[in-house]
Amino acid sequence: DVKVTQSSRYLVKRTGEKVFLECVQDMDHENMFWYRQDPGLGLRLIYFSYDVKMKEKGDIPEGYSVSREKKERFSLILESASTNQTSMYLCASSLAGGRANEKLFFGSGTQLSVL
Amino acid sequence: QQQVKQSPQSLIVQKGGISIINCAYENTAFDYFPWYQQFPGKGPALLIAIRPDVSEKKEGRFTISFNKSAKQFSLHIMDSQPGDSATYFCAASIGGSGSRLTFGEGTQLTVNP
């Protein structure tokens, strides 16, 4: 079974702090994604990556950056956390190429509270 | 701008009943329409998906109905069970790839025993 592991289930940070959310997948997937989930808004794509050291902006990249130094690891960085970034953050991965990449495998999420 | 609109936001159904969740999309370039199921404390998981070359797809008690001209698709859960209680998300993507999904707002389904 594919496993996508997010380093923290709950995280509380202060406004202005730099925050790192870590995600690791164990199935050698090329694609990795960061979504945020908010009630009434569904899942919104922040950033994604098709390969090591590659990144693409999603629909809501403002205030975030990402890092992918190794294939299995994709980090989301909040440069200066703000209260409006309080949310559930979900990492996902998928295979590259053709229809094989249709299925996203999600981690269990990190609930981030910015005070 | 929400390109995929989902309704209702919440749904309560009795055990054995039919649950119906609807989605409408705007972008006619979308050509892959999955549904994801999320249980509390877990990430979403792919439930069932459809492409616009068919109007219906059935997997067990779960059926997707697709209406290309109306730009709508829906999830039907037959014989709903308490174990189906979860949040359901519809989604859509372009180019036959699930890589960049646009999700609906989600529907919280409760199936009462």
Image (tube, helix red, strand yellow):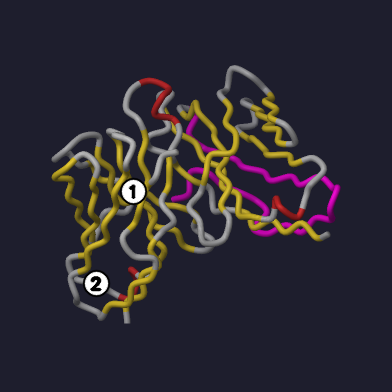
Q: Which kind of residue does numbered mark 2 sit on?
A: Ala
Q: Farthest front residue? A: A1
At numbered mark 1, what does the secondary structure look like: helix, strand or loop?
A: loop
At numbered mark 2, what does the secondary structure look like: helix, strand or loop?
A: loop
* In this rendering, position of residue B5 left or right of residue A8: right
Q: Which residue is drawn at 77% across and 56% down?
A: B111
The residue marked by circle 1 belongs to what chain? A
Q: Does the magenta stretch include residue B6?
A: yes
Q: Which of A80 and B61 is in front in this view?
A: B61
Q: Residue at x 31, y 34 (%)?
A: A29
Q: Does the magenta stretch include residue A53?
A: no
Quadrant hosting residue B58 = top right
Q: Mark 2 points at which residue?
A: A81
* In this rendering, position of residue A55 left or right of residue A83: left
User: Could you tell me which quadrant the C terminus of chain B lies in?
Assistant: bottom right
Percent x, y of residue A72: 24, 42
Image mark for residue A59: 1
* Both labels 1 and 2 in a single chain: yes
Q: Residue at x 73, y 57 (%)?
A: B11
Q: Which residue is drawn at 53% across and 48% down?
A: B104
